[in-house]
Image: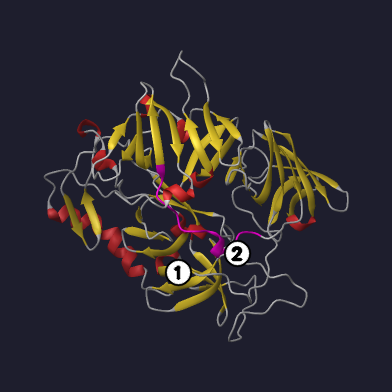
Amino acid sequence: MSRTIKAGGLLVTALALLGPALAACDSALEETVERTAAAPANTSAAPASAEPGTQLHADVLYGRVTTIDGATYEGRLRWGRDQEAAWSDYYNGTKDENRWAVHAPAAERPADRHRLEIFGVRFGGSEGSNKFERQFMARFGDIARIEAHLAEVQVTLKSGTTFQLDRYEAGDIDDGVRVWDGKRGVVDLDARRIRTIEFLPTAASVTAVDRLHGTVRARHGAFTGFIQWNRQDGERADELDGRSAEGRVSLHYDAIRSIARQSRDSALVTLLDGRELVLSGTGDVGDGNLGVYVDDPRYGRVLVSWDAFDRIDFSAAGRGAAYGDFQPGRALAGSVTTRDGRRLAGRLVYDFDESETTETLDAPLLGVDYTIPFSLIASIAPAGREGSGARRATVRLRGGEQLELEPGGDLGEGNAGMLVFAEGRKEPDYIPWADVAQVEFDGPAATEHNSRP
């Protein structure tokens, strides 16, 4: 829905455009809870206990969901019924505004226009450059609370930092949430009914979930960790769909040993019993595949595209990260060295966006997209300008490994530059990305002494 009205528009026009939003608000008052037929409801007063001998895992999402009519549901969570299910998975959305844009050079700032707001829906607003528009992405383990409103979604991190996301842009809140509630059984909550989601440490009584784990081999290396096949399937009970010579096939991942790319539109699937099937013709296999997420501890997370994918060998999983393993983010701090030799130190804002250690650097290499938390990064040296240096950016990790990444994403020409808040100063120094020679990040001990600007 467009939320911009040209200057000079009449109020009646605004009210007319508001109609769909009011209709949505009205429909949100209706009961939309669905009981899934796929899983029996648990009518006991507490979540079902694990079977004897079953290992308990604390790495699955858990929380309390409150609806617009005050009802509460508590238990294991899964986004969109069959999508994100673990603390290491990511919540996505679009930031409503960029809090750092006020520090940009005046000529580059988005033009502020008068905003008309009716029942929480804003008309008008910023126009001009979209240079400072940003996506939001955070691991569920870094989030304390999500609160949905008519026009915005507020996300509060464990650090206390809040982000306002645009409700009308594509975001994970629209997928709804499945809750394994101890009293009501399995409940699917439509996004329109959700008011708040409070994340909590996973209860000890939650039965273990067998998550997908394995090693993905790509053009330039191998990545091992928890898996989301096709950006979605993350549990061994999920199904891989495809077409074989005999017709359509659906296979539970717990029956699969490996998947190997055979052609642009097909894959060779080897089962645990040794049988082999060539599957094609669906989004799960072939060029319709959206890619494979791997939570590799070395890098945080990578997305291996179908073009770069070679094969995956599934393996047993160890313990995944629990909610308490995700510590609150700290302020990014360090120094920026410019191409003319100046060095500026203090609190850092990277690309007019990332300002905490839990936020991520996003950049590609040969069909693999890296999503690296800044807590893992020691330094970044951008690619040299045309004809003046290296064609790739150098990212040095705290573990000692050095990555040579393509100048794209957060390392590309679209980077809006760096802000450096020197100690004791409220206004930052601005360094255009083209002038940055190197960024060095302080470690945890040094960062703790830096305050927010």
State whether residue 263 is above or below residue 30: above
State whether residue 77 is above or below residue 311: below
Q: Residue 107: x, y in percent? A: 21, 31
Residue at numbered disc 1: 198
Q: Which one is nearer the viewer's eye here, 279 or 415?
A: 415
Q: Residue 206: x, y in percent? A: 63, 73
Determine which of the numbered discs, if any, sits on residue 278 in the image.
none
| Residue 264 appears left or right of 161 | right
State whether residue 233 is above or below residue 6: below
| Residue 402 appears left or right of 238 | left
Is residue 324 found inside the magenta-colored segment of the image? yes
Is residue 452 found inside the magenta-colored segment of the image? no
The residue at 32%/66% (across/down) is 25
The residue at 37%/23% (across/down) is 341
| Residue 432 appears left or right of 60 | left
Name which residue type carries label 2. Answer: Val
Q: Which one is nearer the viewer's eye here, 256 or 370?
A: 370
State whether residue 441 is above or below residue 322: above
Q: The residue tagged with tag 1: helix, strand or loop?
A: strand
Determine which of the numbered discs, if any, sits on residue 60 in the image.
2
Magenta residues span 320-333
